[in-house]
Image: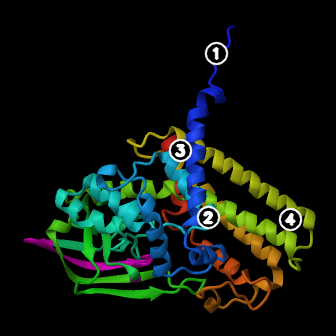
Amino acid sequence: MDNPPSTSRAGLAPALDAEEDFRRQVRDYCRDELPPAVRRKVLGNLFLSKEDNLAFLRSLAPRGWVAGHWPRVYGGSEWTPLQRFVFEEESMLGGAPWLIPFGVNYVGPVIYTFGSEAQKRRFLPPILASEEWWAQGYSEPGAGSDLAGLKTRALREGDHYRVSGQKIWTSYVQWADWMFCLVRTSEEARPQQGISFLLIDMRSPGVTVRPIRTMDGCHHVNEVFLDDVRVPAENLVGEEGRGWTYAKFLLSNERILSAETGRAMRQLAHLKALVASTPSDGIGDRAAFDRRIVQMELKLHTLRAFCLNYARSMDPSQPPGVEASIMKIRGTELQQLISEATLDWLGSSAIAYDPADVNGEEAVSPAGPPDTSGAIREYLHGRASTIYGGSNEIQRNIISKAELGL
């Protein structure tokens, strides 16, 4: 039998060269343009302020990378899915923060895909210029991963809605100017069909924000109370009752980015450097611990291969498939494995923790290496990664329903 036509590296060379060139560009940015103070805090796993995040976004602006995946007509660079993955991976590996996604990755694409022309003109430029900060009003006390059960009501009264209800676990809303919010506008038919997508000005009378301190002692999340809040009807995105469709569009984009392989690569490199430089009083069987590290490396290589293959073949005009759920599960579980192993190696040094140590400009710790407190914060905060963005149990249900018909 004749051999099939070759599709070896020779045929793929131009694409691989372009991919590697873009990687070099992101590495150059991290080395030369990422604010050093921000990089230092990221590498120490310290808590980042709003100003830290804004400094990061401003450093991306000259390259047009604040919203690189947006269409050019709206100010983006029309990155391919592969370029988007490479940017996320290389920037995190190089010490850049998680690009807080609520404006750039979440509501921005919803607005330019489903919003009115007036909404595009009003909201997209300030998002791109990092002049307005957004938060995501999805989860409620009785509706976390099961968003169809949300109770926040929006009643239409002429040219506005009156919104009443509560949101919870709302990340960084204490910094936000606006919140995009899922609200119930109808009780008819299936629960999903009565949900709408509203844009709410956080300065509106009746909006109250209360902080929730998470296990790391930092202020990431909040409760938001909406008490008879007037929202102009022009702030409805798309059609009334179609919010579930827009929410699924947003969440599928959220899960594409959840593998965070660059972050895992950075954290695993930190663990290996720690093992090489710092004695441990927490590990009795060194050979078994070394096997743990090798197993984590293998999981990381496998995840990266899966993500790269998907990013190279993904059709950006189609919604992500179950691959996004697989990436979310494997990426978050791997991050937790690495942070657990890091604390195991630190042993008794990881017992003492003061949140004040991770809210400064430099890594400090009462025991162990200076970045011990940061490693503890990474472990504590990382407990939530398998819950937020759609819990991993929900992701497994998505996979089983799509692939097994269950």
- Whole-percent x, y for residue 226 in the image: 28, 82
**Residue matched to label 1:** 4
Judge by depth and name the residue closer to the eye, 277 or 153: 277
Pointer 4 or 2: first along the chain = 2
Q: CA distance from mark 1 to mark 2?
A: 44 Å
Give the quadrant of the N terminus. top right
The residue drawn where x is 23% and y is 60% is: 120
- Whole-percent x, y for residue 306 in the image: 62, 45
At label 1, which amino acid type do we have?
Answer: Pro
Q: Which mark is residue 363?
A: none
Eye-nearest disc, 4 or 1: 1
The residue drawn where x is 44% and y is 78% is: 172
Q: Are marks 1 and 3 in contact (CB under 8 Å)?
A: no
SS for dot 2: helix
Residue 378 is left or right of residue 222, and the answer is right
Q: Is residue 228 magenta?
A: no
Magenta part of the chain: 156-174
Q: CA distance from mark 4 to mark 2?
A: 33 Å
Instruction: For label 2, count other residues whose C-alpha is less than 10 Å away and answer few (under 14), some (14-19) or many (20+).
Output: some
Eye-nearest disc, 1 or 2: 2
At label 4, which amino acid type do we have?
Answer: Phe
The residue drawn where x is 34% and y is 69% is: 150
Eye-nearest disc, 4 or 2: 2
Pointer 1 or 3: first along the chain = 1
Which quadrant of the view contains residue 231? bottom left
**Residue matched to label 2:** 31
Instruction: For label 4, count other residues whose C-alpha is less than 10 Å away and answer few (under 14), some (14-19) or many (20+).
Output: some
Q: Which mark is residue 289?
A: 4
Q: Are marks 4 and 2 in contact (CB under 8 Å)?
A: no
**Residue matched to label 3:** 311
At label 3, which amino acid type do we have?
Answer: Ala
